[in-house]
Image (cartoon, grey):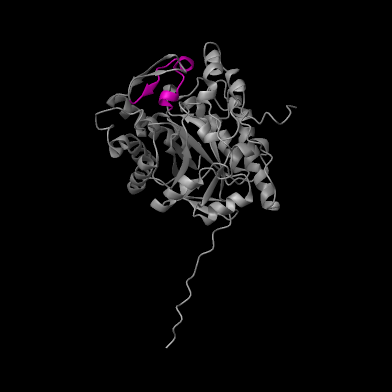
Amino acid sequence: MSTHSPAVSVEAPPDVFSPAQLGPITLRNRVIKSATFEGCTPKGLVTDQLIDYHLAVARGGVGMTTVAYLAVAPDGRTHGEQIYWRPEALPGLARLTAAIHETGAKVSAQIGHAGPVANARSNRAPSYAPTRRFNPAGLTFDRRVSTHDIQRIVEQHAQAAVYAREVGFDAVEVHFGHNYLASAFLSPAMNRRRDEFGGSIARRAEFPRRILAAIRERVGHDIAVIAKLNMVDGYRGGTHLEHSIPTAQLLESDGHLDALVLTGGSSLMNPMYLFRGGAPVREFAATWPNPQRLGIRLVGRWFLKAYPWEPLYFLEDARQFRAALKMPLVLLGGVVDKAGMDTAMREGFPFVGMARALLREPDLVNRIQAQPTTPSLCIHCNRCMPTIYSGTRCPVIPTP
């Protein structure tokens, strides 16, 4: 009788450049261009500049590029020049998706409502939050979201997904991060409500769950539905892992998501928690009129906290999500080379997200595939961050 135990088969991790299924769609590889607001829609409509921006990374090898940020309503924009879903915007968006598809890449639409991140003055519309609060961006007070507002905004998300399907998007990425409206509802610091949408983790998650249910009901499984979720807000009292992991488990149990993108940081309280690296206070202040410009110069070092950059800086937190969930997860944050991609695959993340490195080198994915030791030239200075108001770009690259 043999005393040897049978060999245990250990499945090899996938190659990041192998095709992958994401809900109903197949990506040519597992690299997703993460949503980064492009800053090139001055009339709230698609421009050739926006199309060229995404064509560059699509031709450069990504499996899917994400168009950001497409607000579900006029009052859901972070700035008045952003695209929001309406009939006038559809022809340009259809032109964009058709151009991307010609490259062999897929294209996703990031949809959402900015809530307290919205600039009410620029939008000429009120900004909203779970509970009333002062909004320094618009120098006004956010309105408390009513039950009627919630019903309206849920329906606007569903209609945005329908529009996205009609104009050829392969996926929608619902923005539940960075203290945009849904993320603000999830935050114990920002959600002080005492009704069915506040209090416990499950109640704070009710609004985002309704959004996903409405989207899936309207579009079925014709397109992929993913969500971008904060793991950690990055400030005292905000969302942390003890809140975000149970929230993710609730979203998974509902069965409406094809994947979850893991992120962190707050556009309101701590944006550099997402970006890491240099804090471009002077450059950021220059993009604002007074008195905001003076305010940013005075308190910028507090608001734009500098965090040291390191490869895969969200990995430690993301591992805990991987252990708690079965659904596909997208790892982003410091993915800049083949070594990082391979680590993500080994750790059980079937997709990786890239953003800033592709601003400097839109063809970086193709070059990594051709030569795996190719390094990224991104220096993590974050001076690209303030360019969102004039056309997001790498300022290290000389302007032609």
Can you name the residue that lies furthest to the bottom here?
1
Rendered position, 122 above or below 147: above
> In the figure, is residue 299 to the left or right of 376?
left
Find residue 201 and report its horizontal and vertical position in percent: 30, 38
Rendered position, 382 above or below 105: above
Find residue 178 and report its horizontal and vertical position in percent: 45, 32
Image quarter where the C terminus lies is top right
Find residue 312 and report its horizontal and vertical position in percent: 55, 45
Asked which quadrant contains residue 136, the reply is: top left
Q: Is residue 399 visible?
A: yes
46 or 298: nearer the viewer? 298
Find residue 256 and report its horizontal and vertical position in percent: 37, 45
So how many labels did they put on this image? Answer: 0
Asked whether 125 falls inside the magenta stretch, the response is yes
266 or 58: nearer the viewer? 266
58 or 395: nearer the viewer? 395
Q: Residue at x 46, y 26 (%)?
A: 268
Can you name the residue that lies furthest to the left here?
195
Q: Residue at x 44, y 86 (%)?
A: 2
Rendered position, 152 above or below 288: below
Q: Residue at x 53, y 56 (%)?
A: 346
Image quarter where the N terminus lies is bottom left
Q: Is residue 326 visible?
A: no
Can you name the residue that lies furthest to the top here?
290
> In the figure, is residue 142 to the left or right of 46?
left
> In the figure, is residue 265 to the left or right of 343?
left
**Which region of the structure is painted magenta?**
114-130
Asked whether 360 falls inside the magenta stretch, the response is no
